[in-house]
Image (cartoon, helix red, strand yellow):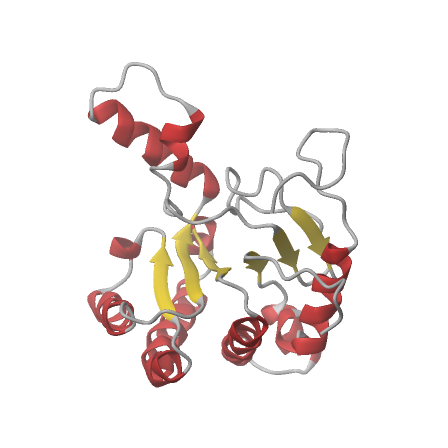
Amino acid sequence: MADDIKIPRHIAIIMDGNRRWAKRKLLPTGYGHKKGFDTFVSIADACGKLGVEYLTVYAFSTENWSRSAEEVDTLTGIIKNSVSSYIPKLAENNMRLRVLGELHRFDKATQKALTDSIESSQNNTGLNVNICLSYGGRADITAAVNKLLASGKKEITEKDITENLYTAGMPEPELMIRTGGEIRISNFLLWQCAYSEMYFTDVLWPDFNEKSLMDAIKWYSGRSRRFGGTEGETKK
């Protein structure tokens, strides 16, 4: 790999475009979501090989619950079945899985599949894979503040909030990628992405591949990260 390519410690991805991908191919929506999960698996593998330490993906937002009951059932079924089948892959590639979000809102079978996956990977020391399920950035911040208030805190600092988010103990994402052509962050990691470099691509998520990932990383490598200052990159 070229010396001028900087590999982010933490990459966050909004995996957008599954439904449009399926529609363009005259396929059921569920097939698009399934293909999207397959893409997630391949991108996680690529990130692990590149030396990325954390990968956080937006798989199911708090707003997604408002979709039709049929699509929600399809999505949760794919999550349950795909995560269960991914356990051997996690172990094989030494990845550690976490779920960020309101896991309690899923049915018991889905909760168990996710919990089993999490527990089986906790001793792994490679790529940390965070799957955001029933996640919202505003809800994340609100829950952190309420937790601090319940603890008796009278004055809350930025450090307090950071240490009580789902991502506590993790570095903030240096690179946020959104596929599918939309140019917004859709309530994803609002606090954590305050200084992330944001890369938007028209590629639909099921078509996103290792080359697409490297295109994003090369773009990121050319950015000067000043964090509000006037000099070059001040921290990584």
Give above or below for 94 relative to 6. Answer: below
Q: Position of residue 37 (x, y in %)?
A: 50, 75
- Closer to us: 7 or 210: 7
What's the residue at 38%, 81% (across, down)? 86
Residue 182 in view (yes/no):
no
Give above or below for 128 relative to 173. Answer: below
Q: Position of residue 162 (x, y in %)?
A: 41, 36
The answer to whether 200 appears left or right of 66 in the picture is right
- What is the count of numbered marks? 0
The answer to whether 216 appears left or right of 77 in the picture is right
Q: Position of residue 96 (x, y in %)?
A: 36, 68
Q: Position of residue 164 (x, y in %)?
A: 33, 37
Q: Based on the displayed image, in which of its 4 quarters is residue 100 positioned? A: bottom left
What's the residue at 62%, 53% (across, down)? 176
Q: Based on the displayed image, in which of its 4 quarters is residue 147 positioned? A: top left
Residue 74 in view (yes/no):
yes
What's the residue at 43%, 65% (across, down)? 129
Give above or below for 66 relative to 17. Answer: above
- Closer to us: 32 or 13: 13
The answer to whether 172 appears left or right of 202 in the picture is left
